[in-house]
Image: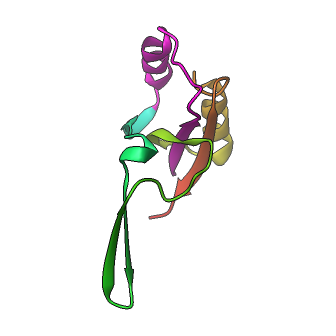
């Protein structure tokens, strides 16, 4: 099964120097399909179509204090394995990881 890990934190987050190497070590041995950091919410573009009209707006869709800062797409046999992997992610003690199964 494929899972989307949404890596979230707020504006107070400051990555320790070990974050890059720790994350690389965490990924080693996992079935990672994709992943990386994403732009900050203020740099986002929001697109909607309502009554046939395209609406394009700058900035985030929500004003939540925590926001998606990165993602991973990983393969696991069970949701329990995904939870165990998320619990071991270097960001878990510093932020939040939301797990969602990807349906095919």
Q: Quarter-wise, where is residue 83 in the image?
A: top right
Seen at 44% across and 64% down, the residue is: 104
Work out whether 15 lies above or below 7: above
30 to the left or right of 47: right
Q: Residue placed farthest to the top in the image? A: 17
- Please name whichever residue, 62 or 92, is drawn nearer the observer in this view of the structure: 62
Seen at 32% across and 85% down, the residue is: 53
Q: Is residue 64 magenta?
A: no
Seen at 49% across and 16% down, the residue is: 19
64 to the left or right of 46: right
Magenta-colored span: 1-30
Q: Whole-percent x and y of residue 97?
A: 61, 38
19 to the left or right of 54: right
Work out whether 30 lies above or below 5: above
Q: Total marks drawn?
A: 0
Work out whether 78 lies above or below 54: above
Q: Whole-percent x and y of residue 14?
A: 53, 19
Work out whether 15 lies above or below 43: above
Q: Whole-percent x and y of residue 86?
A: 61, 33
Seen at 42% across and 45% down, the residue is: 42
Indicate the colouring scheme.
rainbow
Q: Whole-percent x and y of residue 93?
A: 67, 23
- Please name whichever residue, 81 or 17, is drawn nearer the observer in this view of the structure: 17
């Amino acid at each position: 099964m494929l899972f989307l890990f949404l890596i979230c934190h707020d504006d107070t987050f400051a990555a320790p120097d070990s974050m890059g190497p720790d994350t690389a070590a965490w990924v080693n041995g996992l079935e990672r399909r994709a992943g990386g950091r994403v732009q900050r919410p203020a740099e986002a573009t929001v697109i909607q179509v309502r009554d046939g009209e395209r609406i394009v707006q700058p900035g985030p869709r929500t004003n939540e204090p925590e926001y998606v800062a990165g993602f991973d797409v990983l393969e696991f046999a069970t949701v329990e394995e995904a939870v165990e992997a998320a619990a071991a992610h270097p960001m878990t003690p510093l932020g939040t990881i939301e797990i969602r199964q990807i349906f095919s």
